Image (tube, grey):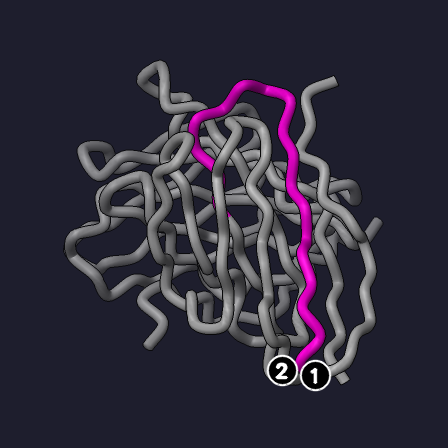
Amino acid sequence: EAQVTQNPRYLITVTGKKLTVTCSQNMNHEYMSWYRQDPGLGLRQIYYSMNVEVTDKGDVPEGYKVSRKEKRNFPLILESPSPNQTSLYFCASSSRTGVLAKNIQYFGAGTRLSVL
Amino acid sequence: DQQVKQNSPSLSVQEGRISILNCDYTNSMFDYFLWYKKYPAEGPTFLISISSIKDKNEDGRFTVFLNKSAKHLSLHIVPSQPGDSAVYFCAASADFNKFDFGSGTKLNVKP
């Protein structure tokens, strides 16, 4: 089954304790991206990656890091989480091949993070 | 500042009637627009898209209209079904790498 898998689904942590949210896709997609969803603001893009070792900032990258060492994985790293990073996070992937493929992002089920 | 806006947080429609969800954007560089549907506890799923070279795209019960001069797009669902009850996000992109999403409209289709 084609899917984007995020772990963990729920996480409660404290300010300053480094954490990593993992994202893995089994569709051999070149493109992957991270979003956060906050009430009244919709989804805002944090970082994206066009392929292995190629990443770039989205609209809200402050306080986050990413890496893309393998095609299937795109972890989101919070080196020193703060309460304003409490949010619902989504990872997404899409293919870069084919005329229509890059229009469609496949999303994971989300990770709800609370930073106390 | 948000470049994609969905000004109606919620919409309630009777089963069988038409649902019209609206979206406005400010960036004239956007040339591709998408609608995603999201159920609770799930990630968004792609619904339909439209390129700026078109003004209409249909897929079954779903039609997206684009008015470039007004910087406005709308999603029409005809006929609406209870299973369509979800949050709908519109999104826009200028380069297929960066995407701007609206804040979502929660659609409730009453049986």
Amino acid found under the numbered disc labelled 2: Ser
Q: Is residue B111 left or right of A23 when viewed as pictured?
A: right
Q: Position of residue B108 (x, y in %)?
A: 73, 57
Rendered image: mark on residue A82 = 2
Which one is earlier in the sequence, the residue at label 2 or at label 1?
A: 1
Q: Is residue B83 left or right of A97 when viewed as pictured?
A: right
Nearer to the camera, A64 or A42 = A64
Residue B67 shown in magenta: no
Amino acid found under the numbered disc labelled 1: Thr
The residue that mark 1 highlights is A15
Host chain of mark 1: A
Q: Position of residue B104 (x, y in %)?
A: 55, 62
Host chain of mark 2: A
Dot 1, how many residues are within 10 Å of its Cα: few (below 14), some (14-19), or many (20+)? some
Q: Position of residue B29 (x, y in %)?
A: 16, 52
Q: CA distance from mark 2 to mark 1?
A: 5 Å
- The quarter of the picture where residue B9 lies is bottom right
Q: Is residue B64 left or right of A17 when viewed as pictured?
A: left
The N terminus of chain A sits in image quarter: top right
Nearer to the camera, B22 or A96 = A96
Nearer to the camera, B40 or B16 = B40
The magenta segment = A16-33
Dot 2, how many residues are within 10 Å of its Cα: few (below 14), some (14-19), or many (20+)? some
**SS for callout 1:** loop
Q: Which residue is at 41% across, 22% downward?
A: A101
In the figure, A68 relative to B21: above or below? above
